[in-house]
Amino acid sequence: NAGVTQTPKFQVLKTGQSMTLQCAQDMNHNSMYWYRQDPGMGLRLIYYSASEGTTDKGEVPNGYNVSRLNKREFSLRLESAAPSQTSVYFCASSLTLRHEQFFGPGTRLTVL
Amino acid sequence: AQKITQTQPGMFVQEKEAVTLDCTYDTSDPSYGLFWYKQPSSGEMIFLIYQGSYDQQNATEGRYSLNFQKARKSANLVISASQLGDSAMYFCAINGGTSYGKLTFGQGTILTVHP
């Protein structure tokens, strides 16, 4: 089992460019999440998906969109990247919203 | 809104000794879950232990135990017999009530284990 996988591992964008971060899990989990982690801080929730077909905003959703493509995959899109979106992005999944979340390895994104 | 406070920015412990990492929380939900995660310098987030608000006993997972004091709203992580590989950032987190799914993290505590 690979657990939670994320692509890419690293990305550098210019201001205004767009990109999609991909996430997949093979644990048959129902719920999936996207977080960002800024230096010296804990994680902050961007969006989450309680189950296939549903998505909801988290603490910091502005500037992002998500798609729950199927039960396994949950993507995060930056339509017009800004330097304030420079961060490490983590995807996570859990059996349900009440259960512990398991995290992917993260994507380090720099916006110039 | 839920909140986690970790008041120890950094902690030091000697190898093989026990260490307690503090976590206090604030929530108005009667049903909630408390989680501890470890983040080594390599960056991944590793789930350690979970405590439910209605659990009668303190959670334990190997060398990790959770000292849960509900009335004081504290959920301290105890690591017994520290190892060099325990050196990492440790995060306490909470979800629950109307916020299930919205895991709220504290600022973290950096633990350094000395040989």
Image (spheres, helix red, strand yellow):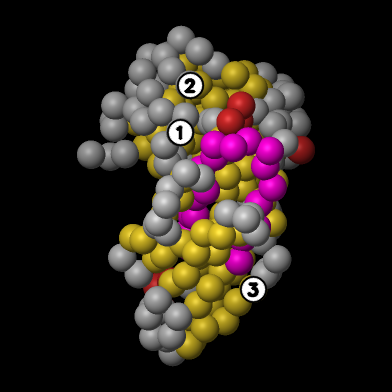
Q: Is residue A36 above or below residue B15?
A: above
Neighbor class of circle 3 (other Cα within 10 Å; few <14, some 14-19, many 20+) is few
Label 1 and label 3: CA atoms lie apart by 30 Å
Taking depth in this image into account, of A80 and B37 the one nearest to the observer is: B37
Quadrant showing the C terminus of chain A: top right
Question: What's the residue at 60%, 66% (across, down)?
Answer: B22
Which residue does the numbered mark 1 point to in the structure image?
A: A98
What span is colored magenta in the figure? B22-42
Which residue does the numbered mark 2 point to in the structure image?
A: A50
Q: Is residue B50 visible in this depiction of the protein? A: no
Label 3 and label 2: CA atoms lie apart by 35 Å
- What is the chain identity of the residue bearing mark 1? A
Q: Amino acid at mark 1?
A: Arg
Taking depth in this image into account, of B68 and A53 the one nearest to the observer is: B68
Furthest-left residue in this view? A1
Neighbor class of circle 2 (other Cα within 10 Å; few <14, some 14-19, many 20+) is many
- In the structure shown, which secondary structural element does the residue marked by tag 2 occupy? loop
Residue B5 position by quadrant: bottom right
Question: What's the residue at 61%, 26% (across, down)?
Answer: B98
Q: Position of residue A7 (x, y in %)?
A: 44, 34
Number of callouts in the render?
3
- Of callouts 2 and 1, which one flags the residue occurring earlier in the amino acid sequence? 2
Which residue does the numbered mark 3 point to in the structure image?
A: B10
Does the magenta portion include B25?
Answer: yes
Q: Is residue B81 visible in this depiction of the protein? A: yes
Q: Is residue A11 above or below residue B98?
A: below
Q: Position of residue A77 (x, y in %)?
A: 59, 22
- In the structure shown, which secondary structural element does the residue marked by tag 3 occupy? strand
Q: Amino acid at mark 3?
A: Gly
